[in-house]
Image (cartoon, rainbow, N blue to C red):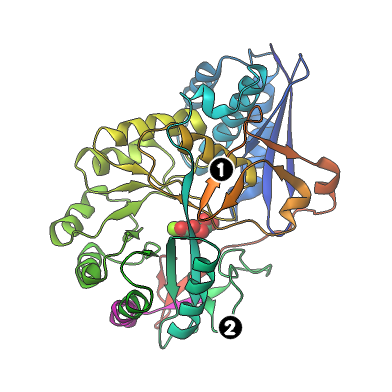
Amino acid sequence: MKIESAEVFVASPGRNYVTLKLTTDTGLTGLGDATLNGRELAVVAYLQEHVAPLLVGRDAHAIEDTWQYLYRGAYWRRGPVTMAAIAAVDMALWDIKAKAAQMPLYQLLGGPSRTKLRAYAHATGWSTGELIASVQQRIDEGFTAVRIQPGVPGLNRTYGVNGAGSALGAYEPAARLALPEEEDWDTSAYMRHIPGVFGTVRDKFGPEIDLLHDVHHRLTPIQAAKLGAALEPFNPFWLEDVTPAENQAALSLVRTHTTVPLAIGETFNSIFDYQILIRDQLIDYVRSAVTHAGGITAMRKLADYAALYQIKLAIHGPSDISPVGFAAALHLDLAVHNFGIQEYMMHPVQARDVFDVDYTYADGALYLSDSPGLGVRYDETAAAAYPYERAYLPVNRLKDGTLHDW
Ligand code: CS2
Ligand code: MG
């Protein structure tokens, strides 16, 4: 079975998604997600100009060899653009292989290790009262694990809630402005505010609900250590991305001072970004997206490496991973032994016009069907009605204008 064509589609049903479609000489098709939020067309060009010509005529079954060919063959290794492109090819080939076998992909990865995939949802509110209402809504929807992101007194907008009165999710699909939106940041104000919010939410909902929080790369290691220690009485499920973590060893300082579980890695794109973090047991959850870390082939190796150290998989699942990339995550989640939890941010409603998916949500968990492959269909005609729109993620400045991590 040979690859006959590789086509790339860009559509914006609520937000931009880049989708690769591979077709074989036997008529099978496979889908891959290549969406890199805010830099989408860089991956489109990489796929169309540099990868598609290499794929035509290749054995569609030779997934590992194709992965190595694209990774080593480029000479210029790693980086989010390259790894998103490789990920899309890898997903599409796994989709094809599973369709050829007439099995859902998770069967080819070893079969199901559990019956359902526990998911966490986002709750957000500028004031603590709004946040509590949002948590209640998630609990009413069946979630038993909720990420809480409050506003910060003195700021006008911040990650996870954007501004007072903003809609749920408005913090993610960067406004369709000519230039990135500018948010403001004050680490001291944030550090003073968060423990009280955690305490109030914990008091209101009791000990059983799991509460998560995303620091979104904003602290130094010593600040992160201090925040972790301050939150310990409220038993967070995890703190996510406490530091930017380009310096992996820095997390050992955080670890020395707090037992709060740490999750990290949505911006990482290689197993090597985790080498020290996993080997030295500095984290508890790996957060890469299948879409950004080289696909199922690479993520399986990452999950297995993490498993040696009792570290669990908690794949990134925001609305900027397409339903194709999200389905790939669910198949891996179902198959690996060290599944932790799955983020479920949900896609814009318009995405349903373009992506027809077989996965379902019920009572705090996600389920896969037994349909062959990834279980996602792409409607090219519907996609054409949602043309690409340039969109940036926000940037973040301190009060004196210094650019800070977003
Ligand atoms: C976030 C992401 O889901 C998360 O944990 O950190 O939504 C992140 O902000 C976006 O994926 C950026 O594109
Ligand atoms: Mg995050």
- In this rendered view, identify the residue nearer to me: 273 or 76: 273
Does mark 1 have its CB less than 8 Å from ligand 1? no
> Which residue position is annotated with label 2?
165
**How far across and down, in percent of the image, does residue 44 sit?**
67, 41
**How far across and down, in percent of the image, does residue 234 sit?**
26, 70
> Which is in the foreground here, disc 1 or disc 2?
1
Count how many numbered circles sit on residues in the image.
2
Name the residue rendered at 23%, 37% in the picture. 309
Q: Secondary structure at mark 1?
A: strand
Answer whether residue 294 is visible to the viewer in this image: no
**How far across and down, in percent of the image, does residue 361 sit?**
58, 51
Q: Amino acid at mark 2?
A: Gly
Q: Is residue 385 left or right of residue 308?
A: right
Q: Work out which residue is located at the far left of the displayed protein and give it.
A: 256
Q: Is residue 278 left or right of residue 336?
A: left
Which picture quadrant has residue 275? Answer: top left
> Which residue position is annotated with label 1?
367
Name the residue rendered at 24%, 60% in the picture. 260
Residue bounds of the magenta highlight:
183-196
Callout 2 crowding tier (Cα within 10 Å): few <14, some 14–19, many ≥20: few
